[in-house]
Amino acid sequence: MIKLLINSSGRAEMSETSFGGKPVKNIGEDFHWPKCSCCKLPMQFLAKLRIDEELHQIFMCQNDPGMCDDWDANGGGNTVVVIKPFELEFVQELSEGETLRETEHSAKVVSVDGNDYEAARSEWAEKNGISPREVLDQISGEPSWIQGDETPNCTVCNKPMEFVAQLEQGPDWKTEMNFGGGGVAYSFRCTCNGSAKFLWQC
Ligand SMILES: [Zn+2]
Ligand SMILES: [Zn+2]
């Protein structure tokens, strides 16, 4: 079985998967907007993914696209901030850097039979008369690599991390995420300490 994330317009619940918009934090907890280790500027908030009881908030440097190794799981040009949502509020926008995307949309999960993500994606689109671009993502399952398998190892326990999601660039070319042009991103976590990593290929 494959879990697809289908684009749906409108704003999502704060504690649910959404793309663009602002990141969230628990009321009363500090939030340090992640900075790129290459250019030192704040990274752009791409999306938040609801993974079981956690929210995985993905950030990637877009201050000078292509210059900060933002594709690399360990390059410091992207990061995943994992929180356990309790009582959420939006994080205040920063005044410097390319920090927010010009879009905000939610997504709904549908489960479909099969074990091949690419096939499931095109079948869903065809059956429902929508563009494959409206299928944003798969949650859990197996990564469908564009290039070779680049499953990252956990920085703490050094074991291969668990795959949690695969992200397409998005439904609209004008506001899509920049994974190198037709690229795909992959997100992982490790249960040893709850850390997460992100990378993309094209
Ligand atoms: Zn940077
Ligand atoms: Zn680990």
Image (spheres, helix red, strand yellow):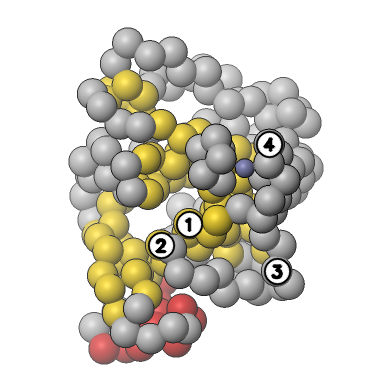
Residue in the foreground of this view, choosing between 160 and 20? 160
Mark 4 CB within 8 Å of ligand 2: yes
Residue at mark 3 to residue at mark 4: CA–CA distance: 21 Å
Sequence-first tag of 4 and 1: 4
Sequence-first tag of 4 and 2: 2
Check residue 164 in the rendering and tell me which mark sits there, or answer none.
Answer: 1
What element does badge 3 sit on? Answer: loop
Q: Residues within 10 Å of mark 4 (few under 14, many from 20)?
A: few
Tag 4 and tag 1, C-beta contact below 8 Å: no
Residue on which the image places disc 4 = 156
What element does badge 1 sit on? Answer: strand
The residue drawn where x is 47% and y is 83% is: 116
Sequence-first tag of 3 and 2: 2
Tell me the kind of residue under disc 2. Ile
Answer yes or no: is residue 97 visible: no
Sequence-first tag of 2 and 1: 2
Q: Does residue 72 appear left or right of residue 8 in this picture?
A: right
Residue on which the image places disc 3 = 149
Residue on which the image places disc 2 = 139
Q: Residues within 10 Å of mark 1 (few under 14, many from 20)?
A: many
What element does badge 2 sit on? Answer: strand
On the image, which quarter does residue 145 sit in?
bottom right
Tell me the kind of residue under disc 1. Val
